[in-house]
Amino acid sequence: MKIYKLYVREEYLEMIESGKKDIEVRVAYPQLRNIKPKDKIIFNNTIPAEVLTIKRYETFRQVLREESVERIFPDKPSFEQAVKRFHNMYPKWKENRYGVLAIKFRLLRSRREQGEESEV
């Protein structure tokens, strides 16, 4: 099991924390190529999660056709708006060069939450 530190924009962090967002889509950079189920992700150094599945795609458009847009972007943008968001985050050449990963994950309880629960 490996631990990956991923950073997301604040609005997406809130969606992850609330449980509305459970698919993270990234360019398949070399440092993410070996990510696999049961690996851990720490979002923004605060939110722990466990990888459930990984799917590789050639393009963001392909991801959006095959995965639930609402689980990637819970605010429900249109298909074209979602593609545009990805291209605002990643230059098209990176998408073309590396491909894309859809990482399905589940939140893990933080130590703080476990401590609060035991105090009750």
Image (spheres, rainbow, N blue to C red):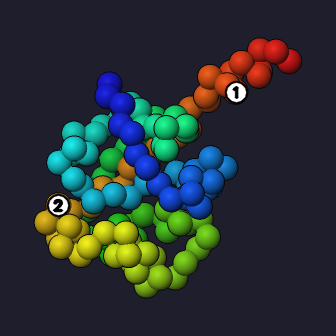
The answer to whether 33 is drawn above or below residue 28 in the figure is above
The one of 92 and 50 positioned closer to us in this rendering: 92
Q: Residue at x 61, y 70 (%)?
A: 75
Is residue 56 left or right of 8 when viewed as pictured? left
The answer to whether 63 is drawn above or below residue 56 in the figure is below
Tell me which amino acid carries mark 2: Tyr
Mark 2 or mark 1, which is nearer the start of the sequence?
Answer: 2
Instruction: Return the residue found at the far top.
Output: 118
The one of 113 and 68 positioned closer to us in this rendering: 113
Picture quarter containing residue 32?
Answer: top left
Position of residue 42 measured from the top left corner of the image (x, y, whole percent): 46, 37
**Quadrant where the image shows the C terminus:** top right
Tell me, for residue 98, which label it has, or none: 2
Position of residue 49 measured from the top left corner of the image (x, y, whole percent): 50, 37
Residue placed under numbered mark 1 in the picture: 113
Q: CA distance from mark 1 to mark 2?
A: 37 Å
**Quadrant where the image shows the N terminus:** top left
Q: Residue at x 55, y 37 (%)?
A: 46
The one of 95 and 55 positioned closer to us in this rendering: 95
Neighbours of disc 2 within 10 Å: few (<14), some (14-19), many (20+): some
Q: Residue at x 77, y 14 (%)?
A: 118
Tell me, for residue 88, which label it has, or none: none
Is residue 38 left or right of 59 when viewed as pictured? right
Quick check: can you spot residue 119? yes
Cβ–Cβ below 8 Å for labels 1 and 2? no
Position of residue 82 measured from the top left corner of the image (x, y, whole percent): 45, 76
The answer to whether 103 is drawn above or below residue 113 in the figure is below
Quick check: can you spot residue 65? no
Tell me which amino acid carries mark 1: Glu
Q: Residue at x 43, y 75 (%)?
A: 85
